[in-house]
C-alpha cells in the first residue's frame, strides 16, 4: 500500500524482489550530507513524495541541529527504487543504520536473517514512548513476542475516493454496494470519464482491490488462512469469487484505459482523479495530502468525497473492516557500529515522534499513530477527513495489513507478479490461485 507508498506509500510497501535496481539516490536531503558522512556514522534512508518527505526531512534536520554529536546522514529514494536498493544494501552489509520497513513479512525476514536489532529492551527503557503510540501499531513490528521496529508517522487505511464534480455531471450517487459500483461503470464510460483511476504499473495499487474484495466476500477468516499458510487457501471458493469480481470490473472497462502503464510513484493516478478524467479511485489515505497540495481547489473546494469500501451482497466481511497500513516502521541495523546504534536510538527516543512531527502530520491531512492526536483535529480545515480516518482505523472490526507487507518478500513478489497478470486478463482466477498456493510456506 506505501506509501505510499506511505505517505507516498505506501505505500502503499513490501520488498519486491523484482523491482528494478535503479536505486540511485534521487535526493540527498538534510544538513548532514551524503549517507555515511555524519559524525556518529549513523545514516537513515527515507521515502520521497510530499508531504511525507518534507516532514521526515524536517524531523531529521531538527534532531541533527540539537545533536551535533549524533547526527544522522539522510538520503531519500522513490518507493520502488528503495525496495531494490535496501535489499541489495542489506545483503552486502552496507545497510543504513535506520532501515525503513513496512513491518510484517519483510521485517520477519530481517529478523530471521539476524539483520535487525531486537528493540524490546529499548521500549522497556522508553516506556513513555511506547505508551504514546497506538497499541495496534505494534503488531506488525513484533516477531515471536519481541519488538524489532519503532512504529511511527501515521495510520493509512485504504479509502475509496470520489470526484463529486464528475458524479454531479452524470447525476450519480456515491455507491454503497458492489452492485451499485458495477452499475455505475457503463454510465461513466458513456460520459467519457473513466470509472476508476488506477496506477497499475506499480502493481501494489491493484492489490488493494483484491484485499478489500477478499475481506468483503470472505471476511477476516480468509485472510488468516492465507497468513497461516493453510494449504490451498487461495483456492477457497470465496477467493475465487473475489478474483472473478475484479476481472469482471476489468472486462467492463472499469479502469482508465492503459492503467497498466500508469505509475503511482509519480502520483499520475491521483492526477487522473482530480483533473476529472476519472470518477473514483481506491487508494491509501496518504494520497489525501498530495491531492490537497497538487490538485488546485479539488480538495479545498469540496470536490473530493470518500468512504469505506462498498459491501458485497452475501459477503462475510464486517462492513467496518479495513485494510492498509497500521503504521510506518523504522528498524535498527544489527551490523551498525555501537556509536551509530546509540545515535539511532537517541533519534527514536527524542526525534522521531515529537509534538512538531505530530502536528505536521495532522496539518498534512494525516492521522498520527499518537494517542490523543485527535485533540488536534478541531479547527483544522481537514477535520472531517481526519475524523473519518481516525474512526475508520479505531472502529474497524478487523484492520488487515497490506498483503505485500504481511507476506514474506518472496511470496509478496509472487503475489504482485500474478496480480499484474490477473488484471491483464492473461491468467484465470483458478490459475492465480494455483500459483499462489505453490508459494505457501506452512506456518
Image (cartoon, rainbow, N blue to C red):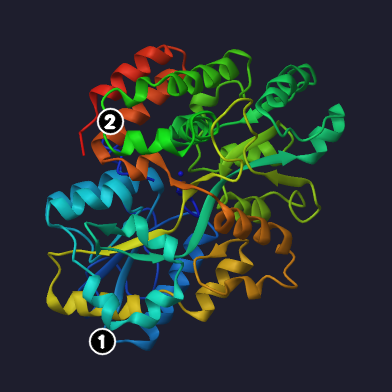
Q: CA distance from mark 1 to mark 2?
A: 50 Å
Left or right of residue 360, residue 89 in this image: left
Crowd class of label 2 (few under 14; some 14 to 19; many from 20; radius 10 Å):
some
For residue 160, the mark is none
Residue 317: horizontal and vertical position, in percent? 54, 36
Residue 261: horizontal and vertical position, in percent? 49, 26
> Residue at left 19%, top 61%?
116
Where 404 sits versus 203, above or below? Answer: below
Residue 190 image-quadrant placement: top right
Left or right of residue 20, residue 247 in this image: right
Residue 186 image-quadrant placement: top right
Quadrant the C terminus occupies: top left
Residue 352: horizontal and vertical position, in percent? 40, 74
- Disc 1 secondary structure class: loop
> Residue at left 62%, top 28%?
312
Where 141 sits versus 59, above or below? Answer: above
Crowd class of label 1 (few under 14; some 14 to 19; many from 20; radius 10 Å):
some
Label 1 sits on residue:
69
Residue 177: horizontal and vertical position, in percent? 69, 30
> Residue at left 19%, top 63%?
333
- Disc 2 secondary structure class: loop
- From this viewpoint, is residue 177 visible? yes
Residue 47 image-quadrant placement: bottom left
- Decide: marks 1, 2 in contact (CB < 8 A)? no
The earlier-in-sequence mark between 1 and 2 is 1
Residue 226 or residue 262, whichever sits in front: 226
Residue 156 or residue 144, whichever sits in front: 144
- From this viewpoint, is residue 350 visible? no
For residue 230, the mark is 2
Amino acid at each position: 500500500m506505501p506509501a505510499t507508498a506511505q505517505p507516498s506509500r505506501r505505500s502503499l510497501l513490501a520488498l519486491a524482489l523484482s523491482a528494478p535496481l535503479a536505486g540511485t539516490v534521487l535526493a540527498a536531503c538534510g544538513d548532514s550530507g551524503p549517507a555515511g558522512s555524519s559524525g556518529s556514522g549513523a545514516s537513515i534512508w527515507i521515502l520521497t513524495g510530499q508531504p511525507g518527505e518534507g516532514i521526515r526531512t524536517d524531523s531529521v534536520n531538527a534532531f541533527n541541529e540539537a545533536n551535533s554529536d549524533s547526527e544522522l546522514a539522510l538520503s531519500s529514494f522513490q518507493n520502488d527504487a528503495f525496495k531494490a536498493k535496501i535489499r541489495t544494501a542489506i545483503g552486502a552489509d552496507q545497510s543504513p543504520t535506520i532501515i525503513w520497513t513496512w513491518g510484517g513479512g519483510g521485517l520477519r525476514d530481517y529478523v530471521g536473517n539476524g539483520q535487525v536489532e531486537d528493540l524490546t529492551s529499548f521500549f522497556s527503557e522508553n516506556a513513555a514512548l511506547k505508551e504514546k503510540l497506538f497499541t495496534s501499531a505494534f503488531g506488525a513490528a513484533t516477531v515471536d513476542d519481541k519488538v524489532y521496529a519503532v512504529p511511527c508517522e501515521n495510520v493509512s487505511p485504504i479509502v475509496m475516493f470520489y470526484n463529486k464534480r464528475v458524479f454531479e455531471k452524470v447525476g450519480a450517487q456515491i455507491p454503497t454496494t458492489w452492485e451499485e459500483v458495477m452499475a455505475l461503470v457503463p454510465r461513466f464510460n458513456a460520459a467519457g470519464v473513466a470509472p476508476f483511476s488506477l496506477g497499475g504499473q506499480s502493481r501494489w495499487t491493484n492489490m488493494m482491490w483484491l484485499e478489500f474484495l477478499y475481506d468483503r466476500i470472505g471476511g477476516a477468516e480468509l485472510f488468516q488462512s492465507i497468513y497461516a499458510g493453510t494449504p490451498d487457501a487461495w483456492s477457497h471458493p470465496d477467493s475465487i469469487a473475489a478474483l472473478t469480481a475484479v476481472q469482471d470490473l476489468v472486462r467492463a472497462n472499469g479502469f482508465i484505459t492503459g492503467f497498466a502503464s500508469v505509475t503511482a510513484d509519480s502520483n499520475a493516478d491521483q492526477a487522473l482523479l482530480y483533473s476529472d478524467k476519472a470518477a473514483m479511485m481506491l487508494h491509501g489515505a496518504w494520497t489525501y495530502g498530495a491531492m490537497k497540495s497538487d490538485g488546485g481547489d479539488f480538495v479545498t473546494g469540496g470536490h473530493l468525497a470518500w468512504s469505506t469500501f462498498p459491501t458485497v451482497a452475501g459477503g462475510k466481511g464486517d462492513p467496518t473492516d479495513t485494510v492498509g497500513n497500521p503504521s510506518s516502521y523504522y528498524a535498527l541495523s544489527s551490523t551498525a557500529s555501537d556509536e551509530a546504534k546509540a545515535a539511532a536510538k537517541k533519534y527514536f527516543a527524542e526525534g522521531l515522534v515529537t509534538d512538531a512531527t505530530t502536528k505536521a502530520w495532522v496539518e498534512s491531512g494525516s492521522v498520527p499513530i499518537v494517542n490523543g492526536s485527535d485533540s488536534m483535529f478541531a479547527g483544522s480545515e481537514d477535520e472531517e477527513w481526519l475524523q473519518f480516518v481516525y474512526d475508520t482505523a479505531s472502529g474497524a472490526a478487523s484492520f488487515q495489513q497490506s498483503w505485500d507487507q504481511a507476506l514474506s518478500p518472496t511470496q509478496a513478489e509472487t503475489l504482485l507478479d500474478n496480480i499484474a497478470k490477473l488484471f491483464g486478463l492473461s491468467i484465470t482466477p483458478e490459475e492465480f490461485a494455483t500459483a499462489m498456493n505453490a508459494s505457501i510456506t506452512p506456518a
